[in-house]
Image (spheres, helix red, strand yellow):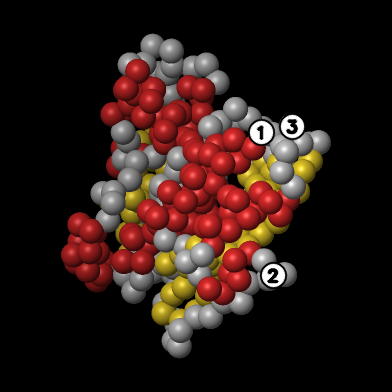
Amino acid sequence: MTKGEFDLIETYFAPLAKAEPGSLNLKDDAAVLRLGQGLEMVVTTDCLVSGVHFIPDDPPETLAAKLIGVNFSDLASMGAAPRFFTIAAAFPRTLEEGWIKRFAEGIKQCQERFGGVLVGGDTVSTDGPMTLTLTAFGEVPEGTAVKRSGAKPGDALFVTGVIGDAYAGLRLLEGRFDHLETSDKDYLIERYRKPTPQVKAGQALRGIASAMIDISDGLAADLGHLCEASGLGGVVDSKAIPLSSAVANLLAEDHLTYEEIITGGDDYELLFSVPENKIGALEAVCTSFEKPISRIGAAQEGREVVFKDGNIRLDFDRTGYCHF
């Protein structure tokens, strides 16, 4: 890199902040942000580390999409609309400026698609792995944020989209599934590299979903988190879990197992519970979602989360991704 920190900010990141006057064009010590009356702020932070959360040679545009996607997915899971975000980047000293330019362009594309404005952050150089941290700020009408803790016994469990694509995409990049058609390979890799936060669906589910979480660590693990927060158990019909044709074929050919699909993680879909008396309201709004929804099970009394294949209980060695 030939430019210094402030030159890089001025060239590539300050233009992303111009839509929000409170960003002060990234020239001050902090942003000054205002929310309108009757709104609450939802704040989340996620960190991506090279070699842990992404492959070191992932393209900068897709890495930008992943950084935005995983954070905005947290906002979506609480029904929040993205408003602002900050990025703290530890870039390797040997990184070329052209990479940063492409990364900033990827951030711009995400801003245009999902909303939110870059309002601050930090850039440093490092001799270690690249580390990218984003803090996202969203807004919800006061008292409407959807939490993990609101599910009740008998509530139906739903997911958006399909499960298992991102895990299959990662394994494909690691050398598995060479037999797949090029179109399936491209699709699965895209799903791993560029998660799509379900921002519109999350907002539409305010007042309908009793509890909600995004699927990052894996369906089994995140359903466990939701049930634990609600003080409940849950039961899921594995055959009801929605799969893409690519993953369904891998499963049918014994190249993937249900355990891998259910525990693999990185789906960034929404998992949510809905009382039976609000199913009609759900059906009325779900046509506006970017992805279809599928009913996969129910919350129930107790504390146990169970996955079944017909009458057969599925037992897994693990429930999902764990950092430690």
Please report the residue visible at 44 percent of the width from the left and 43 percent of the height from the top: 195
- Residue 3 visible in the shown view: yes
How much space separates mark 3 and mark 2, taking CA atoms? Answer: 28 Å
Please report the residue visible at 53 percent of the width from the left and 80 percent of the height from the top: 34
Q: In this view, does 120 lie above or below 65?
A: below
The one nearer the camera, 243 or 276, is: 243
The one nearer the camera, 208 or 42, is: 42
Give amino acid for label 2: Asp
Circles 3, 1 touching at the beta carbon (< 8 Å): yes
* Residue position marked by numbered label 2 in the rendering: 28
Q: Is residue 134 above or below residue 209?
A: above
* Residue position marked by numbered label 3 in the rendering: 94
* Residue position marked by numbered label 1 in the rendering: 96
Q: What element carries label 1?
A: loop
Whichever of callouts 2 and 1 sits on the residue coming sooner in the sequence is 2
Please report the residue visible at 44 percent of the width from the left and 68 percent of the height from the top: 80
The one nearer the camera, 225 or 282, is: 282
